[in-house]
Amino acid sequence: MPRAADQTLPLQDWCVLSLRARGRHAGLRAASARLGARTLALSPLIIEMHDDDATRDALRQALRADIVLFTSPNAAAAAAALRAPALRRGQIAWAVGSGTRRALRAHGIDARAPTRMDSEGLLALPQLADIAGRRVGLITGAGGRNLLAPALRKRGAEVFRADVYARRPVPLPPTALGKLGDALADPQRVLLPLSSGEALHHVLAELPGALRRPFARIAVAAASERLAQAAREAGFRRIAVACDARPASLLRAASDAFG
């Protein structure tokens, strides 16, 4: 039986839907529990690390660049699994956000991160404005929005891209769909922290027809205005915008708007 004090938690009795890749729900699950919510992992994607000679060669070139950009914790982990990354004197590393920066620190790399934790945040950095003729290593995953490399090349940089992992869509398990159906009996207390448009697209494609209408009535906490717009276009109406994609930030925005 919950303690009386638990009844004051901001998201008490809510169900938080995690669209993180399979096996990567721990951070969101812990943050949700601190606010009184339970987590339902849907896992529309899995992460596949690349381990072949072509990827190793691309990574080797990217790590030799003047500036090295890591676009996710998965990129940091995959790069470390392929080759112990190390920076030489004068070389600069940037992480897309604080989670990626922490992942790099665990592997001995002291990286910087922008205040706005996404590709647009990296591109807005003064340090990446005047880079004509400089070599930039981009350590990332296959697919995605592909925003950074074209923008950096347009600024005159020589970009060495290493796709060290890939996100692969997988069917939603029947057990997860059953639990989702149970949660959607009360869609007003279901929250979707949204940090990936790709993950949302795959979930919507997998939803049975009977769940589509109640699913559109849930609350969404988007990691950016771009993702909020994607949610609106998908039919969601209860949308809050967080300052970044960290679980705590997404849940704080939801708590302030809907809790």
Image (cartoon, rainbow, N blue to C red):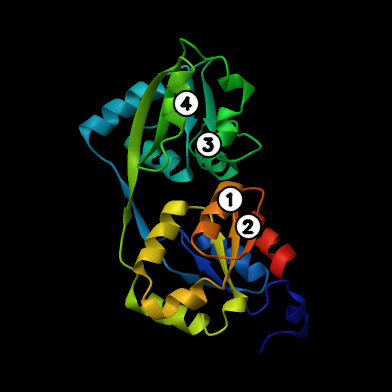
Q: Which residue is mark 4?
A: 151
Residue 75 against residue 94 in the figure, above or below: below
Toward the bottom, the furthest residue is: 1
Toward the top, the furthest residue is: 133
In percent of width and height, residue 195 lies at: 52, 53
Distance from the alpha carbon under mark 4 to that under mark 3: 10 Å
Distance from the alpha carbon under mark 2 to that under mark 4: 28 Å
Mark with earlier residue (2, 1): 1
Mark with earlier residue (2, 4): 4
Residue 203 against residue 177 in the figure, above or below: above
Mark with earlier residue (2, 3): 3
In percent of width and height, residue 114 lies at: 62, 34
Please tell me which residue is depicted at 40% across the width and 43% down the height of the picture.
144
Residue 187, quarter of the rendered image: bottom right
Distance from the alpha carbon under mark 2 to that under mark 3: 18 Å
Q: Which residue is mark 2?
A: 250
- Residue 85 visible, this orientation: no
Q: Could you tell me the amino acid type at mark 4? A: Ala
Distance from the alpha carbon under mark 1 to that under mark 3: 12 Å
Mark with earlier residue (4, 1): 4
Residue toward you, 239 or 133: 239
Distance from the alpha carbon under mark 2 to that under mark 1: 6 Å
Please name which of the two marks, 4 or 3, marks the residue nearer to the observer. 4
Q: Could you tell me the amino acid type at mark 3? A: Ser
Please name which of the two marks, 2 or 4, marks the residue nearer to the observer. 4
Q: Which residue is mark 1?
A: 245
- Where residue 119 is drawn, which disc sits there? 3
Q: Could you tell me the amino acid type at mark 2? A: Leu
Question: SS class of the residue under badge 3?
Answer: helix
Do the CB atoms of the residues marked 2 and 1 lie less than 8 Å apart?
Answer: yes
Please tell me which residue is depicted at 53% across the width and 58% down the height of the picture.
231
